[in-house]
Amino acid sequence: MALLALLALTGCRRETEAERVDPAGHEAFYLWPGVRPAKNVRAKILYLLDGEVRRRGPVRLEKLRMGMPRLPSKKIWLVVRADRLDWNDAVYETIFDDLHRWREAGNEVVGLQVDFDAATRGIGGYGNFLRDLRQRLPRHWRLSITGLMDWSAHGDPRALARLAGLIDEVVVQTYQGRTTIPGYEDYFRRMESFPIPFRVALIEGGAWQAPPMLSRHPQFKGYVVFLLSRNSSDGH
């Protein structure tokens, strides 16, 4: 009982010591439709959800963002959230057309991000999909994907190395819903040899204490904060 009490006290202390993620201290953000950033947010990089390829029904891009504002002085990534990978030609054409139209509207579009929760043991198969996507995607667009923290702990190093030749970055997700995933420090300890440029995605208001290894990791490129609406409980 004494040991359990000590462990609970230690967990509470860690939660207290960890700072809450304040968007005002960051410059890169996930911005889903309907979410308005606070006035003190100074964004330089925006990941904007464009649409979803859903598991059920016909294979198509369900558009979620109808408007196309001009966002000067900001680098834009268009995000496609995917529940399935059996994309057809129409899906690719719609996505590429959206990238082109956003750029034609006067925005600095960096490229495409695929938000797909690939299981750690399925990284090899996911790589086949990404290889095909990379061949289709015009070379002036960069390619980003989201990644799970478990990749660093149990991912096949050879599969990860192959991904390194296909994508430009991985954004590692550290939260579920509105909550930071407990024990994230252990996952990051195993990322010393992670071979791909990566950012770390944080949830607005979530508890976060940066693991010491991040500041010295040669592939770490910074953070992305997922901004929340006041009425939403949905993260990635």
Image (spheres, rainbow, N blue to C red):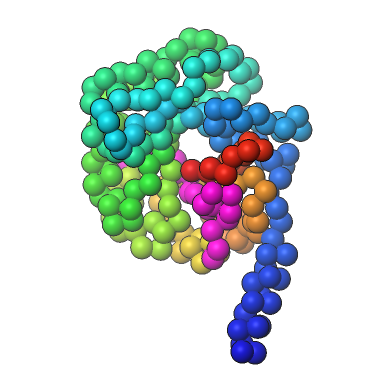
> Is residue 222 visible in the rendered structure shown here?
no
Q: Give the image quarter of residue 71.
A: top right
Splitting the image into 4 quarters, where does residue 143 fall? top left
Q: From what the image shows, is residue 119 above or below residue 14?
A: above
Residue span colored magenta:
165-183
Please state if 104 lies on the left or on the right of 45 as rendered: left
Q: Residue 182: horizontal and vertical position, in percent?
A: 55, 63
Closer to the camera, 93 or 76?
A: 93
Q: Is residue 38 visible?
A: yes
- Give the x, y percent position of residue 148: 43, 52
Q: Is residue 226 left or right of residue 85?
A: right
> Can residue 198 be found in the magenta stretch?
no
Residue found 53% across the figure and 43% down from its top: 235
Which residue is located at x 33 percent, y 21 percent? 138
The reply, left or right, for residue 178 in relation to residue 171 is right
Q: Is 208 located above or below residue 139 in the figure?
A: below
Above or below — where is 137 with respect to 153? above
* Residue at the image point whose x is 32% and y is 45% from the top: 163
The quadrant of the picture occupied by the N terminus is bottom right
- Residue 26 lies, in percent from the top left, at 67, 40
Residue for point 41% across, 35% down: 81
